[in-house]
Image (tube, rainbow, N blue to C red):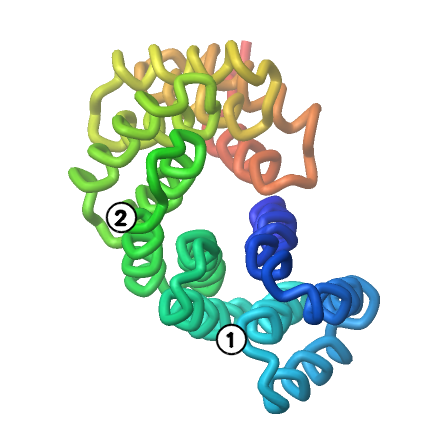
Amino acid sequence: MRRLTLALLIGLTATAAYAQRNPADRDRYGRCIAETRSDAAKAVETANNWRAAGGGLPARHCLAMAYLAQERFAPAAVALEQAARAAEAERDPAAADLWGQAGNAALLAGDTEKAHAYLSSALLGAGPDNQRRGQLLIDRARASVELAKPSEARADLDQAIRLMPKEPAAWLLSATLARRQGELLRASSEIAEAAKLVPNDPDILLEQGNIAGAQGDPAAARTAWDAVVKASPDSPAGKEAAKALAANAAPAK
């Protein structure tokens, strides 16, 4: 659920510029967002009523955040797309952030084609900020991988690394893609960069084990996977590492 948490946190700032220009909506929007945390089902009702009464962009955005809080990712993506289109019509600078959130919601919903399209729209309006563009490129690369478009994913990840050389997610995803494409030297080098930035991260340790296994070093692979299981047994990475250990047991002495 780390990505859902990230989407919610980004959501709290996506309409900040709009709220500043529309102070009458600021308190109502703040109350609606607070309700997404305390009673998401009630927040859906609140946001829909507000939207029906002409609430506009902040009402649509709060509705999306309420859906995200309920893990209803498909309707959240629709609401965010509608909010993004409304922002574009109003020439609101929040449009790029809203397209980015729509892309993340679509990824969570498993609709990678829409995710790719939304994230491409976000990049068109993202401006020159390296951090903003880099994160969007990483997310679009995720969609490209799911759509079996590795060359597009590679181009986005290479650009993301140039823009954000200290971003571990870019190095991790790039290393994973390199391993899947059989570029094991590159994969090993890039996962090492990720590990320098975030030592002992479960996802990075998992990929270190995967790369070591692909390189024909089962002992190193088991060491990395075992570290994941010990550090984070209930995480997705921990469960994947446990499966890898079971499938690659050490030979009996």
Q: At label 2, which amino acid type do we have?
A: Ser
Q: Which mark is residue 144?
A: 2
Q: Quadrant of residue 152?
A: top left
Q: Position of residue 44 (x, y in %)?
A: 68, 79
Question: Nearer the N terminus, badge 1 or badge 2?
Answer: 1
The kind of secondary structure element at disc 1 is helix
Packing grade of label 1 (10 A; few <14, some 14-19, many >=20) is some
| Separation (CA) of disc 1 from disc 2 | 22 Å
Q: Quadrant of residue 33?
A: bottom right
Residue at the (61%, 80%) spot, across then down: 55
Q: At label 1, which amino acid type do we have?
A: Pro
Residue at the (28%, 60%) spot, across then down: 117
22 or 95: nearer the viewer: 22
Residue at the (56%, 60%) spot, across then down: 18
Q: Cβ–Cβ below 8 Å for labels 1 and 2?
A: no
Going by the image, does 190 lie left or right of 253?
A: left
Q: Nearer the viewer, mark 1 or mark 2?
A: 1
Q: Position of residue 193 (x, y in %)?
A: 43, 12
Pointer 1: what residue?
75
Q: Position of residue 45 (x, y in %)?
A: 71, 84
Q: Report the label total.
A: 2
Q: Which mark is residue 6?
A: none
Going by the image, does 161 lie left or right of 237?
A: left
